[in-house]
Image (cartoon, rainbow, N blue to C red):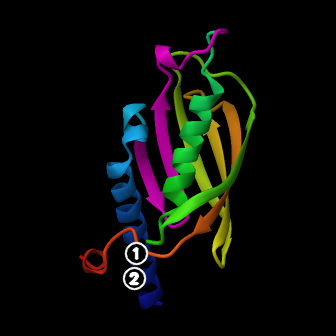
Amino acid sequence: MANNTHDKQVSSELAQRCAQTLYDRDVATQHLGMALLSSAPGQSKVRMTVQDFMLQGLKTCHGGYLFTLADSAFAFACNTYNQPTFALGCSIDYVAPAFEGDVLTATCNEKSRGGRTGNYDVEIHNQKDQLIALFHGKSYRVQGEILSQENVND
């Protein structure tokens, strides 16, 4: 039992390191002011505040920024196993508008993972815990590693 707990801890630590490494390299996500709040195997949570330049003509957050927030959470979640993984396809349903100043949190959870593909769902909520959007992403794993072998066990 102790080994199983240790393995989960190591997996959690690896997941956090992989997600943080990708976040550190992700200029687009950082440019939009997104913050990686947490990560675990197959999971992540990312926060973004809606800024004035993110508004479309009806003064609500442009759907492209909501998609980008969800896509970033998806990317961090599906790359928590130290295996480079890309989006194979994504879709989003906009449920409610987000407005300037809203603090949005995208929470991604793995639904399935096997072979080279995985399925992930993201929910975006505002600071009032209102559902703003639902996103589904399908991932595809490629060869290689996010962290070099020397850095995996550090």
23 left or right of 76? left
View extreme (front): residue: 143
User: Dots 2 and 1: beta carbons under 8 Å?
Assistant: yes
Residue in the picture at 75% in, 30% down: 95
Element at label 2:
helix
Q: Position of residue 112 (x, y in %)?
A: 69, 69
How many numbered marks are there?
Answer: 2
Image quarter for residue 30? top left
Relative placement, left or right, of 43 versus 130 is left
Q: Is residue 100 above or below residue 135?
A: above
Q: Is residue 58 above or below residue 144?
A: above
Q: Position of residue 126 (x, y in %)?
A: 58, 29
Around disc 1, counting alpha carbons within 10 Å, would you say few (fewer than 14), some (14 to 19), or many (20 or more)?
A: few
From which residue to which does the magenta span run?
35-58
Kind of residue at disc 1: Gln
**Alpha carbon separation for disc pair 2 and 1:** 5 Å
- Mark 2 neighbour class, 10 Å CA radius: few under 14, some 14 to 19, many 20 or more: few
Eyeballing the image, is 41 above or below 136?
A: below
Q: Does 37 appear in magenta?
A: yes
Q: Residue at x 23, y 76 (%)?
A: 154
Mark seen at residue 6? 2
Residue 100 position within the rendered picture, expressed as x and y whole percent measured from the top left: 53, 15
Residue marked by disc 1:
9
Q: Quadrant of residue 148?
A: bottom left
| 140 with respect to 34 (left or right) | right
Q: Is residue 3 above or below residue 12?
A: below
Question: What numbered label is drawn on residue 64?
Answer: none
Q: Amino acid at mark 2?
A: His
